[in-house]
Amino acid sequence: MLLLDSRSDDGIKSFFQEVHELYIKSLLNPLYLPGSRITS
């Protein structure tokens, strides 16, 4: 579940940019196994 406090377009855009960046970092992690679940 992802939660966003801001309703402005800039807030939404920056939120998804941050989510995308974290997703890419997870995929590029050498310990990540392709196809496995990403959890925190």
Image (cartoon, helix red, strand yellow):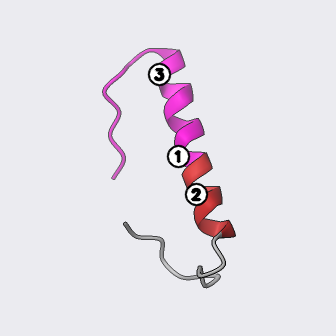
Q: Secondary structure at mark 2?
A: helix
Q: Secondary structure at mark 3?
A: helix
Q: Badge 2 is on which residue? A: 23
Query: Does residue 5 sit above or below 25 in this rendering?
Result: above
Q: Residue visible at 58% across and 65% down?
A: 26
Residue 11: assigned label: 3
Q: How many marks?
A: 3
Image quadrant containing the C terminus: bottom left
Query: Does residue 25 sit above or below 11 in this rendering?
Result: below
Which class describes the residues within 10 Å of circle 1: few (<14), some (14-19), or many (20+)? few
**Identity of the residue furthest to the front in this view:** 30
Q: Provide the residue span drawn in magenta.
A: 1-20
The image quadrant that residue 31 belongs to is bottom right
- Percent x, y for residue 32? 59, 79
Query: Is disc 2 in contact with disc 1, using a CB cutoff of under 8 Å?
Result: yes
Q: Is 22 in the magenta?
A: no
Amino acid of disc 2: Tyr
Q: Residue visible at 38% across and 18% down?
A: 7
